[in-house]
Image: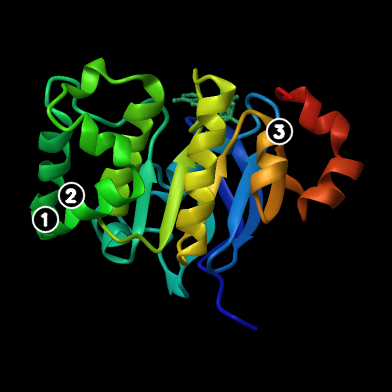
Amino acid sequence: MDVPMLEVIDLHAAYGRIEVLRGVDLRVPKGAVVALLGPNGAGKSTLIKCVSGQKRPTRGDLHLGGVHVANAGPEELARLGLCTIPEGRAVFPNLTVEENLRLVSYAGVATDAVLDVAYDHFPRLRERRSQLAGTLSGGEQQMLAMSRALASDPALLLLDELSMGLAPLVVDELYEIVAAIAASGVSILCIEQFATIALRVADYVAVMSGGRVIATGEPDEIRDTMVDVILGGAA
Ligand SMILES: Nc1ncnc2c1ncn2[C@@H]1O[C@H](COP(=O)(O)OP(=O)(O)OP(=O)(O)O)[C@@H](O)[C@H]1O
């Protein structure tokens, strides 16, 4: 069987003495989009923090592309191809679109290559390249955050609530791009508050509750069996 891009095994994590991840098991196959659903407080953001090296698990294992990374820091994870777009828009509001993109080249990526990738995926950013990022619409800021991430040529992209505060049409547009990114071979793990979107775009859905993954499957199976838990979050 293929080595999954991400494998989480019996992962535990706590804030102080309160354990909030209580044995999470999850796999993200190569090139797949996996959506994490579940009610508020289920532990979705904490799981993303552990996978991205922002929080140390108390026990359990994490493998990225077959490499054991449970104690790896953000830099090593980035070298292994992990890229995170955190909740909220990860852009510098007082820099222009192009300046935001040029900043990515600190990681050794040629500036022209960064700009080409960004403007190919998001032609609207080319039109707005001289505009301050803080004056872009929410959807455009998310496009800018995504293109900064894509410039690092990631193997696994973590998306935390991409759709936060955006209009449904904008969200649809962003998820079309997510699908295109996945089709180019990038694996994607996303937290999505809107179950309907997640069930439409994901290859697999993992439902979290009480610090565990309580169900995983293809969207159709999950839609049929987990409707009550999912609706504990937003539909
Ligand atoms: N920094 C923190 N300190 C203490 N407790 C925290 C902290 N962050 C989260 N928690 C608690 O951990 C539990 C899991 O939170 P987490 O944010 O991972 O859940 P979530 O599924 O992402 O929920 P939401 O959709 O509301 O973000 C919750 O009970 C939350 O109150």
- Read off the residue under disc 2: 115
**Residue at image coords 16%, 59%:** 113
Mark 3: give few (<14), some (14-19) or many (20+) Cα within 10 Å: many
Ligand 1 location (quadrant): top right
Q: Earlier in the sequence, mark 1 or mark 3?
A: 1
The foreground one among 125 and 188 is 125
- Residue 235 in the figure: left or right of residue 124: right
Above-or-below relation of 133 to 179: above
**Residue at image coords 13%, 20%:** 94
The foreground one among 91 and 42 is 91
Q: Amino acid at mark 2?
A: Leu
Q: Are marks 1 and 2 in contact (CB under 8 Å)?
A: yes
Above-or-below relation of 64 to 168: below
Indicate the quadrant containing the N terminus: top left, top right, bottom left or bottom right. Answer: bottom right
Label 3 element class: helix
Q: Position of residue 143 (x, y in %)?
A: 36, 36
The foreground one among 44 and 175 is 175
Can the viewer see residue 20 in this picture? yes
Mark 2: give few (<14), some (14-19) or many (20+) Cα within 10 Å: many
Circle nearer the viewer, 1 or 3: 1
The foreground one among 42 and 91 is 91
- Read off the residue under disc 3: 195
Q: Position of residue 119 (x, y in %)?
A: 26, 46
- Residue 138 in the figure: left or right of residue 58: left
Q: Are marks 1 and 3 in contact (CB under 8 Å)?
A: no
**Residue at image coords 49%, 48%:** 178
Above-or-below relation of 40 to 118: above
Circle nearer the viewer, 3 or 2: 2
- Read off the residue under disc 1: 112
Q: Earlier in the sequence, mark 3 or mark 2?
A: 2
